[in-house]
Image (spheres, grey):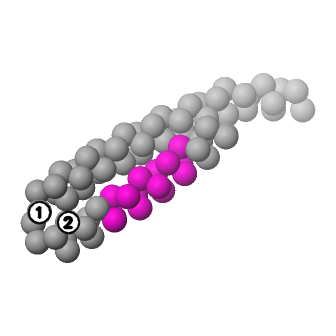
């Protein structure tokens, strides 16, 4: 679960960076540098979110595999 927590923290951090770059882009009156920065940060956020989903799926899959053995042991 630690890796899941780390992945979630990365998504939160990347979300904040995307929002900050969106604000910079909005305040810069169309400066291409900020548009590129925003796009780059959005791509990083998408990658982080994808990694979080994969980590969550693995934790869920592991829990499903362990659940039958736990019920048999009780």
Q: From the top left corner, tell me how far across and down residue 11 is, in percent.
A: 46, 51
Q: How far apart are marks 1 and 2 (CA)?
A: 7 Å
Q: Is residue 9 magenta?
A: yes
Instruction: Quickly name the residue at label 1.
Output: 31
Identify which residue, 59 or 44, lies in the foreground. 44
Q: From the top left corner, tell me how far across and down residue 50 is, in percent.
A: 40, 39
Instruction: Quickly name the residue at label 2.
Output: 25
Identify which residue, 35 or 33, lies in the foreground. 33
Q: What stretch is highlighted in magenta?
A: 7-20
Q: Give the dominant element type of the magenta stretch: helix, strand or loop.
A: helix
| Residue lying at 28% horizontally and 44% vertically, measured from the top left | 43
Q: Is residue 12 magenta?
A: yes
- Residue 67 appears left or right of 29: right
- Locate the C terminus by quadrant: top right
Nearest to N terminus: mark 1 or mark 2: 2
- Locate the N terminus by quadrant: top right
| Residue lying at 18% horizontally and 51% vertically, measured from the top left | 36
Judging from the image, what secondary structure is the residue with disc 1 in?
loop
Asked if labels 2 and 1 touch by Cβ distance under 8 angstroms, the answer is yes
What numbered label is drawn on residue 14? none
- Residue 60 appears left or right of 40: right
* Circle 2 residues within 10 Å: few <14, some 14–19, many ≥20: some
Q: From the top left corner, tell me how far across and down residue 33 is, in percent.
A: 16, 55
- Extreme right residue here? 74
In the image, residue 31 above or below residue 46: below
* Circle 1 residues within 10 Å: few <14, some 14–19, many ≥20: few
Judging from the image, what secondary structure is the residue with disc 2 in?
helix
- Residue 7 appears left or right of 63: left
Whether residue 42 is visible to the viewer of this picture, yes or no, is yes
| Residue lying at 11% horizontally and 63% vertically, measured from the top left | 31
Location of residue 16 (image quadrant): bottom left
| Residue lying at 30% horizontally and 50% vertically, measured from the top left | 41
């Amino acid at each position: 679960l630690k890796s899941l927590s780390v992945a979630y923290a990365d998504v939160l951090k990347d979300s904040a960076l995307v929002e900050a770059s969106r604000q910079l882009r909005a305040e810069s009156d169309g400066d291409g540098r900020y548009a590129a920065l925003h796009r780059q940060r959005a791509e990083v956020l998408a990658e982080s979110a994808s990694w979080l989903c994969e980590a969550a799926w693995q934790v869920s899959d592991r829990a499903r595999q362990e659940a039958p053995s736990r019920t048999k042991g009780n």
